[in-house]
Amino acid sequence: MEQFGGHLHPLSSLIREAGKIFSGMGFTLAEGPLIETEWYNFDALNVPKDHPARDMQDTFFIKDEQGMVLRTHTSNVQVRYMEAQMKKNILPPYRAVVMGKVFRNEATDMTHEAEFYQIEGLVVGEDITMEHLKWTIQTFFSELFKGTQVEVRFRPSFFPFTEPSVEVDMRLTGISAPEKLRDTWVEMMGAGMVHPQVLKNGGVDPAQYRGFAFGGGLDRIAMLRSGIDDVRLMHSADLRFINQF
Amino acid sequence: MKVSRHWLSKFFDAPLPPAAALADALTFHAFEIENVEKFGEDDVLGVKVTPNRGHDCLSHRGIASELSAILNLPLAHDPFGQTPQLAPATNAVSVAIHEQALCPRYIAGYITGVNVGPSPAWLKRNLESLGQRSINNVVDATNFVMFNLGQPLHAFDAGRLSKKAGGYKIGVRRARADEGIEALDLKTYALGYQNLVITDEDLNRPIGIAGVKGGMPAAITEETKDLIIESANFDGVSVRRTAAGLKLRTDASARFEQGLSPELAAWGMEAAAALIIELAGGTLEGFVDQYPVPQKVSPVSVTLGQVRAVLGAGFDDTDICKAFERLGLPYTAESECYTVTPPPWRLDLAIAEDLVEEVARIAGYDRIIPKPLPPAAGKPELNANFYRAEEAREALRLKGYSEIYTSVFAQAGERAVANKIGGEKPFLRQSLVPGLLDALKANVPNKDLLGLKEIKLFEVGTVWQGGKEVCMVATAGEKEEAKETPLERFGKAPDQWAAYPAYVPPPAQYKPFSRFPSITRDVAMWVAGAAVDPELVEGLIQKEAGELAQKISLFDRFEKAGRVSLAFRIVFQSFERTLTEKEVNEIMEKVHAALKAQGYEIR
């Protein structure tokens, strides 16, 4: 019997595919540290000091390192990215996508993991509107779920770092849509127009530029796409799972 | 928050649409709906109020106001429609606020000669529809007003407070480190400087935990005759910390921690006093209102140009005016600039973008039509780390390694997290190798099931060593030493014209696998000649072995003296239980018998 090639983790495959789709739309891949300052993870994103998300049970704080946390979202890269560009004297337009590990200090179950992966997009320019946001997300899902009809809708929501803020739902139709996803609206992401204070914190003038941002769980997208019922499988290191992909 | 459709209907003259339509209206224009449940004839909606609207929408009035705007139904009976009248004033009660920043307003209402008793059916029903227990007419009245208007209230038994020079004195101060209080839940809480308390000022004794829960020392009983009603405003952060610290989150604290408008307190007091007198009788002696720094309301402006710059050119003057009018936001318009003076309870409207959101919500986000991004200026910058990681994955995958993701948490390391639930493995890994070796050990028993000769694993992941956060590439296998290389030393640095790997595995559908251990058996046989198709033999084995045979594979074939030897490996596994050697042996005997019946010679 022959030893076949090994297998990529399904999250790596998804990251690779998403990277290709966004590169094709002119996005650069950006990154940021996993141990992060409270400034980039919270304050710079307009998350006030007394916000419940900053309570002990949600965030991992680093021991004996005041003001350091394990990042709770990939949004920490938003201000870092803008700041880095401005330091290099590169003015908007910006298009960046971030994919990486994030952490939440909570008990794990079939749908919750303390360590999981997120995707985050950031677009800044002089004439960026919510119409572009809707198109970008729709294009991404249409590419990811090629061969199916993809619809995207927005619902009102709240995030401290976007205004207005929306939840993004997706619906797939057509025979090649995965059965569990077919003809139902599924919540996929959070999104919105970058809050002027966040642009300012990144050194970008909100009077001249606007932007949008979106973010969601990559584990969740992979699970929906492949009909995976337990997020813990993603981080199980079990080849009975991984070698199916 | 639970919201009763029946309760909501009291705000309107027009009939309300059915619950499903209310749920849809809220979902697409305001808040997510968690569920809709029946309560008798009534429908109760679980509304997930977003944190930016907790100050005005954790109430039936708040939700009714949203529905009024969304459905374009006039809010015919708006309790905030008129300025509250807190008259007469009384000298019988005084209030001393010692922490102005933590208590911007305190209104006390003094009512004498009430009859505490059961609540009327309508009130019980309303509270029960929200999952609340009816207690008595006085307590129920204060709770009703909270769920109706969003202002938490509390009633003290004045008869159990000290009275000096003909008056009661309420104090608001920080607790002392040695103080405690028995709260209405009959538990005793140890308090400290971080907790704000309500006191019987003359006795200097706590009678309530401010904004969280009342205390037993002044609890309402059936004997209560005289009441002091509290309608106050407490600092949200302070209440949240106290509630979290005491592990005592209440309907009152959940509202105060949103940061409420101090103006609400007056409406709350007026409504509570009126309802208590209606239900429990008594005489309204009067009010005392400590409100030294009234809330300032600042106007907010937005232009049509700003609305279009955010939402798109499809939005016009009508959308803006319609949204503000329906939401009851007073505004003026001048040359395409709209200036809103938010009502005091709308604390969320501070910048132009907040107004843009109101326009978008009321018009509906379906009005936003997707529009392609302008063409990108040139090729996006290549990310060297991502490129190297992808190259590493490709190289290792092609060499037969499978990729795993393991936890960053470890038994040892340079850095650790301070607050891990359960406290296990608080360290951040210094190396990928221990996790990789654990995974290797866990995967080896499944080798036959996986159809592999050897388990080979790799991981690309972050470690923390030498004071730095570094990305590493590590490999491990049964027949090799585990190895780890920093990503930056793996492969070549890309030039700007390189491309990320093109290969993307096609998306597969996951098939659940059994978590029970497997048992492997081999069977080898001589068959007559080369003409025998191994697939036919495999089919025969499958038929005899049944569905417990998870995997059958030909692992050896050779010819000798005109005869052919075939060897198969069979992996048995059940989805329901651990198989025994005995039952697998029995199955194998059947397999052997069937093969022999074909004239094959078992080796």
Image (tube, coloured by chain):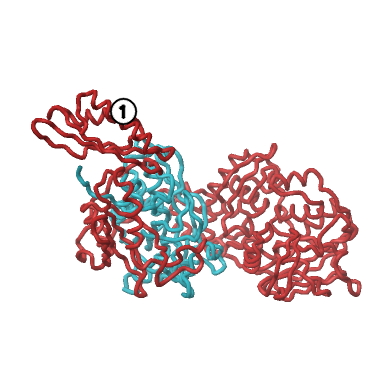
Chain colours: A cyan, B red
Compared across the picture, whether B120 is left or right of B468 comes to right
> Hey, what amino acid is under mark 1?
Lys
Residue B231 figure quarter: bottom right
Q: Is residue B78 visible?
A: yes
Across and down, in percent, residue B602 comes to: 22, 31
Disc 1: CA contacts within 10 A as few (<14), some (14-19) or many (>=20): some
Above-or-below relation of B296 to B62: below
Q: Position of residue A11 (x, y in %)?
A: 35, 52
User: Residue placed at 87% from the left, 58% from the top?
Assistant: B224
**Residue to which mark 1 is pinned:** B590
**Could you tell me residue B257's position as x and y percent?**
63, 63
Front-most of A14 and B307? A14
Task: Name the one closer to the observer, B180 or B424.
Answer: B424
Comparing B576 with B320, the one in front is B576
In this rendered view, identify the residue nearer to me: B272 or B377: B272
Identify the residue at the far left of this view.
Answer: B561
**In the rendered image, is residue B378 in sight?**
no
Determine the chain carrying the residue at label 1: B
What element does badge 1 sit on? helix
Q: Quadrant of the C terminus of chain B?
A: top left
Location of residue B543 in the rendering, given as x and y in whole percent from the top left corner: 30, 27
Count of numbered tags: 1
At 33% across and 62% down in the image, what residue appears?
A: B461
Vertical placement of B73 versus B86: above or below? above
